[in-house]
Image: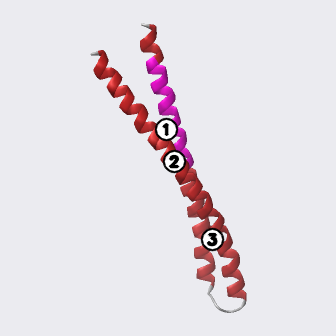
Amino acid sequence: DREAWERSLDQQVRAQVAQIKASTAQISLREANLRLAEQTPIAQKALQDAGRVIQKDVLDAMREVENAKVLLLRARADYQVACLWVEGLQGTLERRRLR
């Protein structure tokens, strides 16, 4: 019935809005993590030059930069998916109103 449909749509919209908010926070966090990760190989290389760390530590730091980039891309993708869901729900609502 119409009331159940409206409740379901409302719940779906609320869930996607919450996902958008969470994704926005994740993006900010992942950007900060990436900035930090990008500084680490530079520091590790300086320590290696001073003989305080080994090449493996430098490579590990470089791998962490790549991991941080992947996590940032995933957070951005989650945001985009949530936005698309909201747009889809909006289209569902508009189609229902046209009937």
Q: Which residue, given by chain and number where applicable, does mark 3 sit on?
A: 62
- Label 1 and label 3: CA atoms lie apart by 31 Å
Q: Which residue, given by chain and number where applicable, does mark 2 sit on?
A: 23
Task: Judge whether residue 70 is colored magenta.
Answer: no
Q: Which residue is at 60% across, 74% downward?
A: 61
**Considering the numbered disc 1 on the image, is that residue within a helix, a strand or a loop?**
helix
Question: Could you tell me the amino acid type at mark 2?
Answer: Ser
Residue 75 location, x and y as percent? 53, 50
- Label 2 and label 1: CA atoms lie apart by 8 Å
Classify mark 3: residues with Cα within 10 Å, few (<14), some (14-19) or many (20+). some
Q: Are marks 1 and 3 in contact (CB under 8 Å)?
A: no
Answer above or below: position of 90 versus 25.
above
Q: Which residue is at 65% across, 91% downward?
A: 52
**Considering the numbered disc 3 on the image, is that residue within a helix, a strand or a loop?**
helix
* Overall secondary structure of the magenta section: helix
Q: Are marks 2 and 1 in contact (CB under 8 Å)?
A: yes
Question: Could you tell me the amino acid type at mark 1?
Answer: Ala
Left or right for 18, reference 77 = left
Of labels 1 and 3, earlier in sequence is 3
Could you tell me how many numbered marks the image carries? 3
Residue 17 location, x and y as percent? 47, 38
Question: Could you tell me the amino acid type at mark 3?
Answer: Met
Residue 39 location, x and y as percent? 68, 71
Residue nearest the observer in this picture, 83 or 55? 83
Look at the image and give the residue range highlighted in magenta.
Answer: 76-93
Q: Which residue is at 66% across, 80% downward?
A: 44
